[in-house]
Amino acid sequence: MKILSINLWNINSPIQKRMNNLNSFITFNKPDIICFQEVSYYGGKIQVHDILCKGEYFFKYFKSGNWYGREEGLIIASKYPISNSRKYLLPRNDAFNDFQRILMGSTIRIKKNKLRVYNTHLSYHVLSAINRIGQIDQILKIINSENSRSDSVILCGDFNEDPDDGLVYKNILNNYPIKLNDSWVERNKTLTFCQSNPYVDSKLWPNRRIDYIFSSENLPLYSYRVLDQDIISDICSDHYGVIAEGNENGDLDEHI
């Protein structure tokens, strides 16, 4: 079982080349669950609509807000049926012209098992740390109110904070009663938003690991950076995506 999380960088140019690269990656690697952030409309439909339909994915989209007139939102996609999808509003940050941030959650049925997947994209500005702390605290309250310690939970997204910044990362790891673990294998050695990516704007504080996949204790995962020129595929965004797998055989179903 493979889980991919990536910020799509909306419809910035070269949009068609980037989506072609993403399509090639998904076609070859066949992730079972995908969490997209910064999704917009292109050509009258969600920018990954054709990719997901071609790959026979179930998917749910929720709008977050508008960025200078362009709609932006989140998607959870799955090879398995999706149910009980919900959108939750997070504490608003009106500074820096930021829009409403949300959490989305969906239940995914894998054979006889239930997996609860959450996807989010926190406030972007480097000076919005206090607001991100409030947003992640709200997310943890939601996760704990909807699940028990025996449930299988995954939290993905672009958190816009490095593990060493603020309290966001620390609060996630100290989350009780449901304890979430960082699936990152390489820890701080590799970055997901960095200057080596030609699409990265140097004004947006690059050279940080800000994209994550967390999972509950009963669902051990390991993850690594993908969708960059050095590892697997041509890049498709200003973020390098993260992919997580269950055990050494990639069989997540054994854990749920």
Image (cartoon, rainbow, N blue to C red):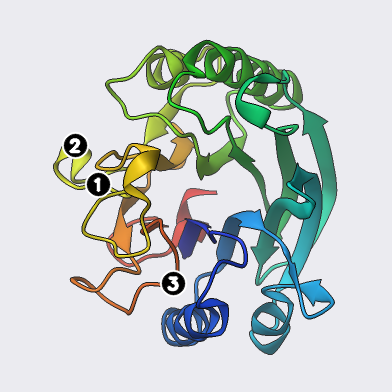
Question: Which numbered mark, 1 or 2, is in the foreground of this view?
Answer: 1
137 w.r.t. 248: above or below: above
Q: Residue at x 52, y 12 (%)?
A: 176
Tag of residue 188: 2
* Callout 1 amino acid: Leu
Is residue 105 visible in the rendered structure shown here? yes
Q: Tell me where residue 88 appears, x and y as whole percent.
A: 80, 31
Q: Residues within 10 Å of mark 2 (few under 14, many from 20)?
A: few
Q: Tell me where residue 240 appears, x and y as whole percent.
A: 36, 59
Is residue 81 visible in the rendered structure shown here? no
Task: Please give the residue where the numbered disc 1 appears in the rendered image.
Answer: 191
Q: Tell me where residue 145 appears, x and y as whole percent.
A: 74, 18
Q: Tell me where residue 238 appears, x and y as whole percent.
A: 41, 59
Q: Residues within 10 Å of mark 3 (few under 14, many from 20)?
A: many
Q: CA separation, marks 3 and 1?
A: 16 Å
For label 2, the SS is helix
Q: Residue at x 66, y 31 (%)?
A: 98
82 w.r.t. 146: above or below: below
Q: Residue at x 73, y 77 (%)?
A: 49
Q: CA separation, marks 2 and 3?
A: 23 Å
Q: Which quarter of the picture shows residue 117?
A: top right
Earlier sequence position, callout 3 versus callout 1: 1
Q: Which quarter of the picture shows residue 165?
A: top left
Earlier sequence position, callout 2 versus callout 3: 2
For label 3, the SS is loop
Count of marks placed on residues: 3
- 211 vs 192, left or right, is right
* Callout 2 amino acid: Asn
For label 1, the SS is loop
Q: Nearer the viewer, residue 159 or 170?
A: 159
Task: Please give the residue where the numbered disc 3 appears in the rendered image.
Answer: 236
Q: CA separation, marks 1 and 2?
A: 7 Å
